[in-house]
Image (tube, rainbow, N blue to C red):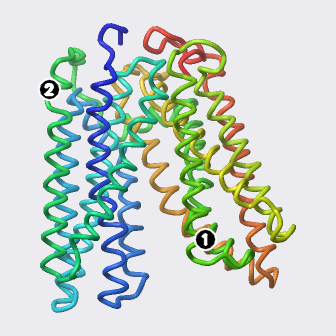
Amino acid sequence: MSQACAFGWGTILRLGLVQTALGAIVVLITSTLNRVMVVELALPAALPGGLVALHYAVQVLRPRWGYGSDLGKRRTPWIVGGMALLALGGVGAALGTALVATHPVAGFALLVLSFLAVGIGVGAAGTSLLVLLSTGVAPHRRGAAATIVWIMMITGFVVTAPTAGHLLDPFSGTRLVAVSGSVSLIAFLVALAAVWGVEPARASAPARPGPAQPFARVLAEVWAEPEARRFTIFVFLAMLAYSAQELILEPFAGLVFAMSPGATTKLAGLQNGGVLAGMIWVALVTANGSGPLASLRLWTVAGCLGSAAALVAIAACGFAGPDTPLRACVVGLGLFNGIFAVAAIGSMMALAGTGGAPGGESRHGTRMGVWGAAQGLAFGLGGFLGAAGVDLARLAFGTVVPAYAAVFTIEAVLFLVAAGLALRIGRTGDSVRPLGGLSVRHAT
């Protein structure tokens, strides 16, 4: 990719609208419908939990969707198709929730099918969007591009959740379906407008001679690449540690520091503010593409190390008592989480087009799919393992503080291992392979 054909900031913002649309549908499914099932319908909390886990489990298919976009050498059809399936899944999930009260068998069946559609749609659209960005964004803009699309996805969460909540009062099944259907339709149209005309304006790579290699062979070749395999393990470990604290930090603050529900919610807000600050920091220091601070690998490693230190500090706060700076440690955790996350996504964009196997550029989607699958599985497992780990540790230790401290420490160790892997990425014997006119060493 030459600098002349790189996406400008306007195009990056346009493509970020796809993430906004995606986030708008997902937040209704994972948050609003979750509450409706448990509160209004008095269903067991395990039901929405299992459906969300199903949506994460389907992420294992991301490599297949990426491979499909590699074959056609166009990402837009997969983004549009994925968003269409996601929108249908959103409507179906709302309809299934409304049906459960009167027709439980039909309602449950529709819910399962809808959450499968949501998982496949998120995987197909999200993977291809990242591939499109990785091939169209100049190397020095990848950190900023990752920040933009992540923040725009959060914007979808922030705008949709309260708006839908307002429109759902007074609650009824019919109103739930109408609101979900409207959000899904608007989100799909926004995503369609965002990608319209972006890819055709760029020259496609010529088709490779001969029949396409089967998916299993391509996947095996990608996994055989040391760099791709190492980065997959890094993504899984780091995202596992990243997500494992989500369900235990607020209970920890409530049990150990006697914080009220409102206070722990504010604590989570401070953490999210730190995440946002970390993302913006990486975007600012890497945007010019020059100097030692422009290295995405540097910030990936720094984010992992800082996250590990913050988790150890939070564990220590539990032993030290109520006068410890818990809030500062939580803000620090959010800051370094944000730094690591956006730098890792930028590095993912840079590494997707490299590989030892022939046709490195043509494996963009498959590689991105492998890493997306690792991320999805880690997110699906992280929350469960974090909460279950605390329960097991409480049985072992008999008290709260050591139990939470043990889990926070394990998460810190995972971040340290991930930092070691990230430090090696791009520094192997073939670390100067060309990547968009730059070496991997400079690009990451």
Residue 427 vs residue 110: left or right? right
Q: Tag 2: residue type?
A: Gly
Q: x%, y% of residue 50?
A: 40, 74
Q: x%, y% of residue 221?
A: 44, 32
Q: Tag 1: residue type?
A: Ala
Q: Which mark is on residue 197?
A: 2
Please tell me in which quadrant of the rendered image residue 150 appears.
top left
Q: Which mark is on residue 416?
A: none
Picture layout, residue 171 above or below residue 290: below
Please tell me in which quadrant of the rendered image residue 195 appears.
top left
Which residue is pictured at 48% across the width and 49% down the height?
A: 375
Q: Residue furthest right?
A: 320
Which residue is pictured at 41% across the width and 30% down the height?
A: 145
Report which residue position mark 1 lands on: 263
| Residue placed most toward the observer, 311 or 266 | 266
Picture layout, residue 181 above or below residue 102: above
Picture layout, residue 368 above or below residue 288: below
Residue 162 vs residue 300: left or right? left
Q: Are marks 1 and 2 in contact (CB under 8 Å)?
A: no
Q: x%, y% of residue 335?
A: 62, 45
Mark 1 and mark 2: Cα distance apart in space: 47 Å
Residue 204 vs residue 300: left or right? left
Which residue is pictured at 21% across the width and 14% down the height?
A: 203
Helix, strand, or loop for circle 1? helix
| Residue placed most toward the observer, 64 or 31 | 31
